[in-house]
Image (tube, helix red, strand yellow):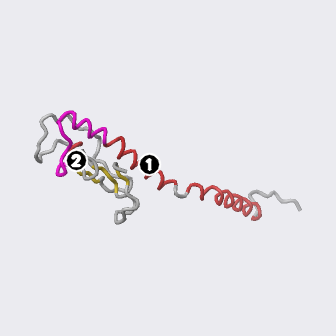
Amino acid sequence: MKRDQKGFTLIEIMLVVIIIAALSAMVVPRLVGRSEQAKISVAKSDITANIPTALKLYELDNGSFPSDEQGLKALREKPAVPPVPTGWNGPYIEKEPVDPWGNPYVYVSPGKHRPDYDLSSLGKDPNSDKDDITNWQ
């Protein structure tokens, strides 16, 4: 008897599953942890380049950096909290910045570590100082 067989046998399907599992076992460990490294890189870039650029533009227009009370929100909308800037020409940044973990950046002006301002992210664990990313280290 001759049968027209269509489809895959169980052995063929099992071989494909084993090959996919072996490839995954080789590739996945290399990718694990990369997302956390990427978040750290984004936070460092925000703290050392993106936000400072907006802050410098704000300072050029207004003669000083936003106060603690005004915070980074002053880069997005004209502050109503004193000292109200007279030369505000913003917005200086598209949206109020938050770190890659969804927390607002910590802004202190004048800074405790730097004379102008301190800028930091609390990192993945807001309760630990070990993973903080700052502009003074």
Q: Position of residue 16 (x, y in %)?
A: 71, 58
The residue shown at (83%, 59%) is: 3
Amino acid type for the residue under numbered disc 1: Ser
**Direction right: furthest residue:** 1
Q: Residues within 10 Å of mark 1 (few under 14, many from 20)?
A: some
**SS at mark 2 in the image:** helix
Label 2 amino acid?
A: Lys
Magenta span contains residue 102? no
Q: Is residue 65 magenta?
A: yes
**Is 10 placed left or right of 128 in the picture?**
right
Q: Which residue range is magenta in the image?
A: 52-72
The quarter of the picture where the N terminus appears is bottom right
State if disc 2 and disc 1 touch (CB < 8 Å): no
Dot placed on the residue nearer the N-terminal end, 1 or 2: 1
Q: Is residue 73 left or right of residue 126?
A: left
Task: Compare residues 36 and 107 and report the one nearer the observer.
Answer: 107
Residue 81 or 3: which is nearer the viewer? Answer: 81
Question: Which quadrant would residue 54 be assigned to in this image?
Answer: top left
Between 104 and 2, the one lying in front of the other is 104
x and y, in percent, of residue 131 in the image:
40, 59
Query: Distance of mark 1 from mark 2, alpha carbons?
Result: 23 Å
Percent of width and height locating residue 41: 44, 48
Q: Callout 2: 10 Å neighbours few (<14), some, many (20+)?
A: some
In this image, 11 relative to 48: left or right? Answer: right
User: Which numbered marker is on residue 73?
Assistant: 2
Local secondary structure at mark 1: helix
Q: Nearer the viewer, mark 1 or mark 2?
A: 1
- Residue 136 drawn at (x, y percent): 34, 49
At 74% from the left edge and 57% from the top edge, which residue is drawn?
Answer: 7
- In the image, is residue 50 above or below residue 132? above
Q: Which residue is mark 1?
A: 41
